[in-house]
Image (cartoon, rainbow, N blue to C red):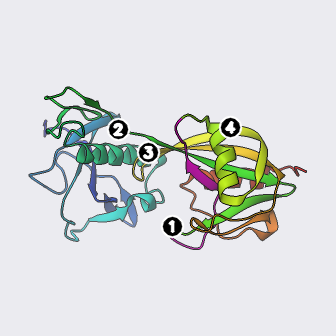
Amino acid sequence: MDTTQAFWWFIFYKDQLLLKKKNGTYAVPCERKPPIADETAIVYSIATLDGYSCQTFAVTCLPKNDEPYVMVGLRESYMYIPHEHFAIAGKARQIVHFNCHTRFCPVCGNPTEQITPIFRQCPACREEYYPPIAIAILALVRKGDSILLVHAHNFKGNFHSLVAGFLETGETLEECVQREILEETSLKVKNVMYFGNQPWAFPSGLMVGFIADYESGEITLQTDELGHGAFYTKDTLPELPGKVSLARKMIDWWIENHVCNQ
């Protein structure tokens, strides 16, 4: 590695990202050498930012509290670093996760070889492996002047969010929206429309958002997944998910632009 030029260093310990703290602000380190060393770490070159190469690796032990460097949860880092840096951090986390979890071929059991940061191959049976992307839908369901929000048991906190679920084999995204809403709340919806998408590095997914209108049914929750669910107006909204999420962007869009849908 050329140590005469600076690199962006996206360094992880589990789901925590190393940031440099200075004068009350945080930044991804941009230095000639990695701020912390791990002789066993494999370094991946993943992108270019502002003319500098982005490098990433994971350490196996939590670094000591060595000012000015601090470890911050990847989700929380959204509040401290520019969006472009956060997006690359998410990509970096997915690449580190992929290479860590595909070291051995699931077909024949032999060690795989890294061809590129996003491509591994088994030298024995020649099977090829790329980062798997788990696709999940988010559904903002409108009913009159209200929207459906739910609280899942696995949420870390008391916030409510949108109905979500993973795409299954053989179904379209729109079919997934209708199925997930019906399974989780017993409601039928119509007018399913695409909203947007977001890479989700927890650990490796793509969230795809849809808007839908209530058609029929009464809320009956799938209690093994959901603890609460109801329709809320703008004036009665509960605690909402963090702004990093596509779900929050969809809810904010509705708050700013909603029209009563009967």
Comes first in the chain, label 4 or label 3:
3
The mark nearer the N terminus, 2 or 1, is: 2
Region rendered in magenta: 156-169
Asked if the residues shown at circle 2 and circle 1 are in contact, with their CB atoms under 8 angstroms apart, the answer is: no
Q: Where does the image place residue 236, in percent across and percent down from the top left?
A: 78, 70
Using the image, determine if residue 40 lies above or below residue 234.
above
- Of 150 and 88, nearer the camera is 150
- Residue wearing tag 4: 194
Amino acid type, callout 4: Tyr
Most prominent secondary structure in the magenta stretch? loop
Q: Is residue 159 magenta?
A: yes
> Between marks 4 and 3, how big is the CA–CA gap?
22 Å
Considering every residue shown, the one lying at the far top of the view is 126
Query: The residue under label 1 is which amino acid type?
Result: Asn
Q: CA distance from mark 2 to mark 3?
A: 16 Å
The amino acid at mark 2 is Pro
**Frontmost residue, 88 versus 194:** 194
Q: Residue at x 18, y 64 (%)?
A: 61
Pointer 1 residue: 154
Left of 48 or right of it: where is 144?
Answer: right
* Residue to which mark 2 is pinned: 131
